[in-house]
Image: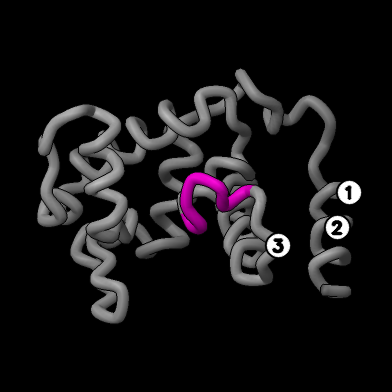
Amino acid sequence: MKHRHIILAFITLIIPPGFGWQAGEIDHDAIWHAICQVESSGNPDAHNPGEDARGIAQIRAIMVEDVNRIVGSDKYTHDDAWCAEKSREMFDIYNRHYHPKGDYERIARCWQGGPKGHLRESEVNDRYWVKVKAHLDQ
């Protein structure tokens, strides 16, 4: 827990004011690319067999089910996660639904930890955000 507070304090210090971390100033392409780098190093063929996470954004079946629930039809299949364009569509639908005014951190934490991922106290979620933020800063 001590390390979590140190990491969060460090992040707070290195984010310059007005850098676009507030709601309404999101570059959705930037957060998408940062998350894809963390998830798969940008590889649309990446696969985590332990979670059956697929594609550039490492989408699991439960995410596809949630996106289909949001759109009100079975528009997507888990195999669509192999397609970078369809993965991006699912990413956008998910974020518009759960985080229409979210910031980069909330979007990243929720992509990793589910719709309430930003509320979780987790070292895994903290490390994930630090990695995404590093790609955003490049």
Question: Which numbered marker is on residue 13?
Answer: 1
Q: Is residue 112 left or right of residue 89?
A: right
**Residue closer to the observer: 74 or 106:** 74
> Residue at horizontal 15%, vertical 55%?
78
Mark nearer the viewer, 1 or 3:
3
Q: Secondary structure at mark 2?
A: helix
> Residue at horizontal 49%, vertical 45%?
115
**Residue closer to the observer: 97 or 54:** 97
Magenta span: 112-118
Query: Amino acid type of disc 1?
Result: Leu
Q: Earlier in the sequence, mark 1 or mark 3?
A: 1
Q: Earlier in the sequence, mark 2 or mark 3?
A: 2
Query: Amino acid type of disc 2?
Result: Phe
> Residue at horizontal 49%, vertical 57%?
112
Q: Secondary structure at mark 3?
A: loop
State the separation of the CA atoms marked 1 and 3: 20 Å
Q: Residue 92: x and y, percent?
A: 36, 32
Q: Quadrant of residue 131?
A: bottom right
5 over 16 or under it: above or below? below
Query: Amino acid type of disc 3?
Result: Glu
Q: Residue 88: x and y, percent?
A: 29, 39
Q: Is residue 138 left or right of residue 112?
A: right
**Which residue position is annotated with label 3?**
121
